Amino acid sequence: MKNPYQKLIEKKRTWSPVRPVKGKVREGSEEVLSRALALRHMELPVGDFITDALEKNVPDAARELLLSNVKDEERHDIALGYIADAHGVNEKDEAEALRIRDAWIAHPDHTIVKAMVAERSIFFCLLPLMRFNGDAGFRGASADVSRDEVIHVSSNSLICRELGLDISDSLDRLRLATIHWVMQPLSATNPDKYLNKRFWLESSNNLMYQGKAPQLTETKAGRMPAFFEHDARNLPQYA
């Protein structure tokens, strides 16, 4: 009988990053997309978190999947880098994103926990944000990366459960600071929910605390297994 990690490997799909042509993004989303894109600098560190964990005590059954996940992060970095090349970057946002990256790297929580928190409650807000507000290039990359991230969060949640790992209050505060910085350009009263700061902050909180975000039910990010409630029978299924 296959273990849950083998089942997750079999759900993976092969894809290759493509260089997009710059298109039109949703009016009013330019600043928040710039900040979301700047956090692409988190992709490789998340891969490093997993590489570091492989040198520690992780389930042997998970090693092949985790090595594959590291390769995914490298591909995500390339895909999002292509979008940055097409749209250009804001140097102030880039600098702040690098400071945020360094804060995540320096945080003392277990690297598997940091990867799981970053992917579940940060990336799974930024990817739908790009999908609903970006151009075709943003949407395509969001779809491809999201499919991988479903597998990553599932595997990291399983490992956290197996190892009895929990999230520290300080890591949760770092999560909050990160998502607040990204969404700061938005208004909390905008009638367009995809440009509403409160919508995205609540999505991050729900993904973090409940493992699901009802307001994102139209995306793959709408339901993620919480690390404390995971059951192999409830792993995400692709249509």
Image (spheres, rainbow, N blue to C red):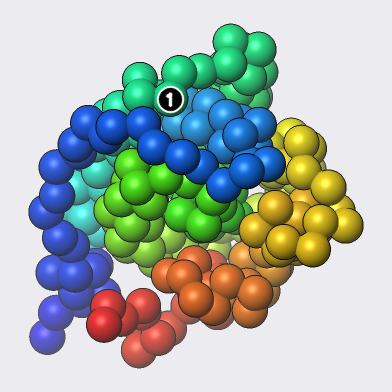
Number of numbered discs on residues: 1
The reply, left or right, for residue 204 in relation to residue 1 is right
Q: Nearer the viewer, residue 186 or 69?
A: 186
Q: Position of residue 57 (x, y in %)?
A: 37, 47
Q: Reply above or below: 82 against 205.
A: above
Lateral position of residue 158 relative to residue 8, left or right: right
User: In this picture, is 13 found above or below 94?
Assistant: below
Q: Is residue 54 visible?
A: no
Dot 1 lies on which element? helix
Badge 1, how many Cα within 10 Å: few under 14, some, many 20+? some
Is 150 placed above or below 80 here? below
Q: Residue drawn at (50%, 32%), measured in percent from left and top?
A: 37
Residue ranking furthest to the right:
189
- Label 1 sits on residue: 87
Measured as percent of width and height from the top left, residue 58 is found at: 34, 52
Corner quadrant of residue 109? top right
Rendered residue at 51%/57% (across/down): 132
**For residue 8, what is the image quadrant?**
bottom left
